[in-house]
Amino acid sequence: MRNILLIGAGRFGCHVAEKLEELNVQFMVVDKNEERAQEAAQWATTVQIGDAGNREFLKSLGIRNFDVCIVAIRDDILASLEITALLKELGAKRVVSRTARDTQARLLRRVGADAVVDPEKQMAEWTAVRCASEHMLEYIQLSDDYAVCEVRVPDSWVGRTLADLAIRRKYGMNIIGVREDGGLQIVIDGDYVMKSGQTMLILGHAKDVQTTFRG
């Protein structure tokens, strides 16, 4: 079982903690604010109250024992940078740090962050993409280049087979599943006929996905 260190029990940190608990992952929450730490205690395996910016305190946690260290601090940029750098100095295997702006993201990478997440920016972009399309229900950007989305089958596709639609050739995308009546069919072949009321899981280049289903 993976072991995760979560530093920061603000709103974002608590959401992460709640999901980790749901996934049955073993993790420790650290925050110097006792009230916030106790809030996260309802989900965490263990809780430590202390300043993660203090090298000796951080060292006492046994950083090398964690598979991933998440720095969920948003507003204190200096603390976020210091903790990220300290984690790598103490032998952290993988550090994922939260950011609130592009400049901070670049600095975090320079001091050793293996990955940087900007929840507000990502959610804003995903919300804009979903709202710009009448067909799109869900949208997840996997990287700068690729995305997965769930879209309603366009009326012009109803009654046509996947082979006839030639989605990969025409649009550079792949249908990885079809959802109907609450069920999900993953393996579909070229003879499959698209039906009204279905939704599709599409994998493709982010720009292609966004423009193809905008209308």
Image (cartoon, rainbow, N blue to C red):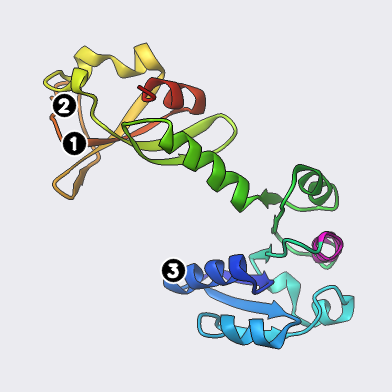
Where the C terminus falls, by quadrant? top left
Disc number for residue 184? none
As measured in the structure, the alpha-carbon distance from the residue carrying label 3 to the one carrying label 2 is: 34 Å
Residue 119 position in % (x across, y down): 60, 52
Of residue 54 and residue 212, the one placed in the foreground of this image is 212
As measured in the structure, the alpha-carbon distance from the residue carrying label 1 to the one carrying label 3 is: 29 Å
Q: Answer yes or no: do the residues labelled 3 and 2 have beta carbons within 8 Å?
A: no
Q: Amino acid at mark 1?
A: Gln
Q: Which secondary structure, mark 3?
A: loop
Residue where numbered disc 1 is placed: 198
Q: Nearer the viewer, mark 3 or mark 2?
A: 2
Disc number for residue 23? 3
Dot 1 or dot 3: first in sequence order is 3
Q: Residue at x 60, y 33 (%)?
A: 144
Q: Answer yes or no: do the residues labelled 2 and 1 have beta carbons within 8 Å?
A: yes
Instruction: Using the image, determine if residue 1 lies above or below residue 105.
Output: below
Q: Amino acid at mark 2?
A: Met
Q: Amino acid at mark 3?
A: Leu
Tell me where the magenta segment starts and ends, as one range: 77-88
Disc 2 crowd, CA 10 A, few/some/many (<14, 14-19, 20+):
many
* Residue 204 on the magenta span: no
Please give left or right for residue 82 compared with residue 195 in the image: right
Please give left or right for residue 70 compared with residue 26 in the image: right
Q: Nearer the viewer, mark 1 or mark 3?
A: 1
Residue 107 position in % (x across, y down): 84, 48
Residue where numbered disc 2 is placed: 194
As measured in the structure, the alpha-carbon distance from the residue carrying label 2 to the one carrying label 1 is: 8 Å
